[in-house]
Every structure is written in structure tokens, then in C-alpha cells.
């Protein structure tokens, strides 16, 4: 019996989704990214429909998300990062301003901009939200939210 050849489905429509990922706390953000990509794959979103952009940290996410959301071929932007409390007020500044900036991108562009920048007191709390192979991984839930929001806005 011959081997079945499977040709991957590939779109020619251009990029549909963008994911902005902070490299700071990479052991966490890479797990969020993997779960996000896996969830897109489970929902038949082709790799060629996803653009991933890595930035230094959570504070850098909004400007990159704005640049991407302004592109006509981007339907939604997912923002992934992790901010962990330290001994200074820096945690509060970064977490709140990342959230504010990401919300502003959504309002300025009228596109779904999914906020999944984890903000927690400990590394362990972030890791619990970014477990490998877990459908409750916040990266996976971000992909589901992006798909749902694109569908919702398209129906309006």
C-alpha cells in the first residue's frame, strides 16, 4: 500500500492574525505562544495566516500591536507577555501601561486586540497559566478569543 500524501492547506489571502510576544520572561511567553499557535492550528488557521513579532518586553507590545493592527490584512492582534512583581513599583507601571496601551490600540483601530499579558506576584502563578499542553493555557484562550471576536465583528 502506498503512502498517502497530504498537502498542507495554505491560503493565498495574506496574513490574517498577528501575535506580539514579549521576550522578557521567555520561559513563560514561549509557552503562551506555542499554545496560541496550537489553538489556531486546531481551528484550521494556516501558519501562513499568522505573523509573529517578538519584542523586548511587555511595555513594547502596544506600539508594535498598533503598527500591526493598522495593516488592512490583519483581522486581529494577540498580545502575549508576562510581568512579575518585584521589589519596586516598576511592576505596577509596566503592567498597567501595557494594558492601557493595548486597549487603546483596539479602540483606535476598531479591531480585536487580545490582551494576554499575565501580571502576577510570582513566576509560579504565571507558569500555572502557561502550562504546556493545557487547553486552559492563556495563549490558547487568546487564540479562541481572537477567532470569536473576528467572527462577532464580521457579523455586525
Image (cartoon, helix red, strand yellow):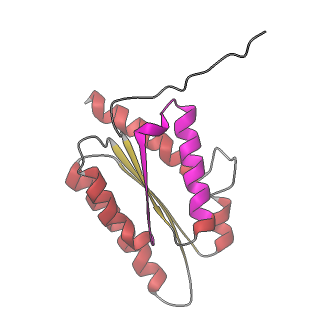
Residue, far right: 1
Camera-side residue: 51 or 122?
Answer: 51
Q: Position of residue 30 (x, y in %)?
A: 58, 59
Residue 40 lies in magenta, yes or no?
yes
Camera-side residue: 46 or 125?
Answer: 46
Q: How many marks?
A: 0
Residue, far front: 2
> Considering only vertical position in the picture, is 98 above or below 145?
below
> Considering only vertical position in the picture, is 76 above or below 150?
below
Magenta range is: 28-57
Residue, far left: 108
Q: Position of residue 137 (x, y in %)?
A: 61, 51
Which image quarter holds the N terminus?
A: top right
Magenta stretch, overall SS: helix
Residue, far top: 1
* Residue displayed at 37% across by 39% down: 149
**Left or right for 76, reference 104:** right
Which image quarter holds the C terminus?
A: top left
Camera-side residue: 16 or 114?
Answer: 16
* Residue displayed at 35% across by 37% down: 150
> Considering only vertical position in the picture, is 21 above or below 155?
below
Q: Position of residue 45 (x, y in %)?
A: 48, 33
> Considering only vertical position in the picture, is 44 above or below 17?
above
Q: Position of residue 19 (x, y in %)?
A: 43, 52
Residue 37 lies in magenta, yes or no?
yes
**Left or right for 105, reference 46:** left
* Residue displayed at 54% across by 47% down: 36
* Residue displayed at 50% across by 90% down: 88
Amino acid at each position: 500500500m502506498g503512502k498517502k500524501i497530504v498537502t498542507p492547506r495554505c491560503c493565498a489571502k495574506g496574513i490574517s492574525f498577528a501575535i506580539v510576544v514579549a521576550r522578557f520572561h521567555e520561559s513563560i511567553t514561549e509557552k503562551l505562544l506555542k499554545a496560541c499557535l496550537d489553538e489556531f492550528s486546531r481551528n484550521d488557521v494556516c501558519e501562513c495566516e499568522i505573523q509573529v513579532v517578538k519584542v523586548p518586553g511587555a511595555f513594547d507590545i502596544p506600539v508594535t500591536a498598533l503598527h500591526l493592527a493598522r495593516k488592512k490584512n490583519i483581522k486581529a492582534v494577540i498580545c502575549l507577555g508576562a510581568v512579575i512583581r518585584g521589589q519596586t513599583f516598576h511592576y505596577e507601571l509596566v503592567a498597567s501601561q501595557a494594558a492601557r496601551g493595548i486597549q487603546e490600540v483596539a479602540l483606535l483601530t476598531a479591531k480585536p486586540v487580545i490582551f494576554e499579558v499575565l501580571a502576577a506576584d510570582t513566576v509560579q502563578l504565571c507558569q500555572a497559566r502557561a502550562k504546556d499542553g493545557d487547553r486552559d493555557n492563556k495563549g490558547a484562550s487568546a487564540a479562541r478569543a481572537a477567532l470569536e471576536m473576528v467572527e462577532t465583528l464580521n457579523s455586525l
